[in-house]
Image (cartoon, grey):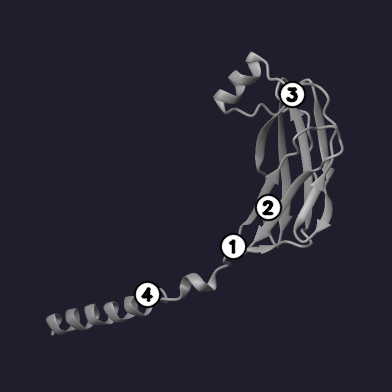
Amino acid sequence: MKTTLKYVSILFLCTLLGACAPKEDATELYHQESPLQADITMPDDFSGNDPIKIELTQDNKTVEDADFVHVEIWKGDGSFHDGMEEAENAGKGMYTFKKDLSKDGLYYIKVHAGNNGSTIMPTLPFAVGELSKADVDALNDHAPAESGNHSQHH
């Protein structure tokens, strides 16, 4: 009798645990994120005439009206920091931003963009005019030295 009760208990537990197995399509029940992507094109010179172009895509489609697109620029040596400013929607997934940078050196641009719950903040280094030895060394170290006095608002 004890043996039969033991086997029935084991059979019952196995059946109970088998019922708790995850569904095969469980991953489809969770939010599937489609990341936002940005392609940043810098002008040849920074006279203020040619804009920085930012093309946003999501799900392999252009993002016509992103939730926000802000641009932040700072100089690698910390002597210049331009707070976040809104980029202009030029249509067809293209956003533009104009900035006149007259001093030579290494700069960084950070694009803060968001759409449909996906937020990205790519940072790119770029040169204006001639780079100093310190700028070249900073580029070789791949360390974007952010200015510490910027705010995070959208």
Q: Do the residues labelled 2 and 4 touch (CB within 8 Å)?
A: no
Foreground mark, 2 or 4, reads 2
Which residue is disc 3 drawn over? 129
State the image coordinates of residue 24 (x, y, percent, origin top left). Answer: 41, 76
Q: Is residue 20 above or below residue 138?
A: below
State the image coordinates of residue 148 (x, y, percent, origin top left). Answer: 74, 27
The three-letter code of the residue at mark 1 reads Glu
| Residue at (81% x, 42% y) in the render | 51
Q: Earlier in the sequence, mark 3 or mark 2?
A: 2
Q: Earlier in the sequence, mark 1 or mark 4?
A: 4
- SS class, disc 1: loop
Q: Is residue 22 above or below residue 138?
A: below
Give the CA separation, mark 1 to mark 2.
Answer: 11 Å
- Across the whole image, how many numbered discs are drawn on residues? 4
Q: Earlier in the sequence, mark 1 or mark 2?
A: 1
Which residue is disc 2 drawn over? 119
Looking at the image, the residue that sits furthest to the front is 44
- Where the N terminus falls, by quadrant? bottom left
Q: Earlier in the sequence, mark 2 or mark 4?
A: 4
Give the CA separation, mark 3 to mark 4.
Answer: 63 Å
Which residue is disc 4 drawn over? 21
The three-letter code of the residue at mark 4 reads Ala
Foreground mark, 3 or 4, reads 3
Q: Splitting the image into 4 quarters, where does residue 64 fall?
A: bottom right
Foreground mark, 1 or 4, reads 1
Q: Do the residues labelled 3 and 4 touch (CB within 8 Å)?
A: no
Foreground mark, 3 or 2, reads 3
| Residue at (66% x, 37% y) in the render | 124
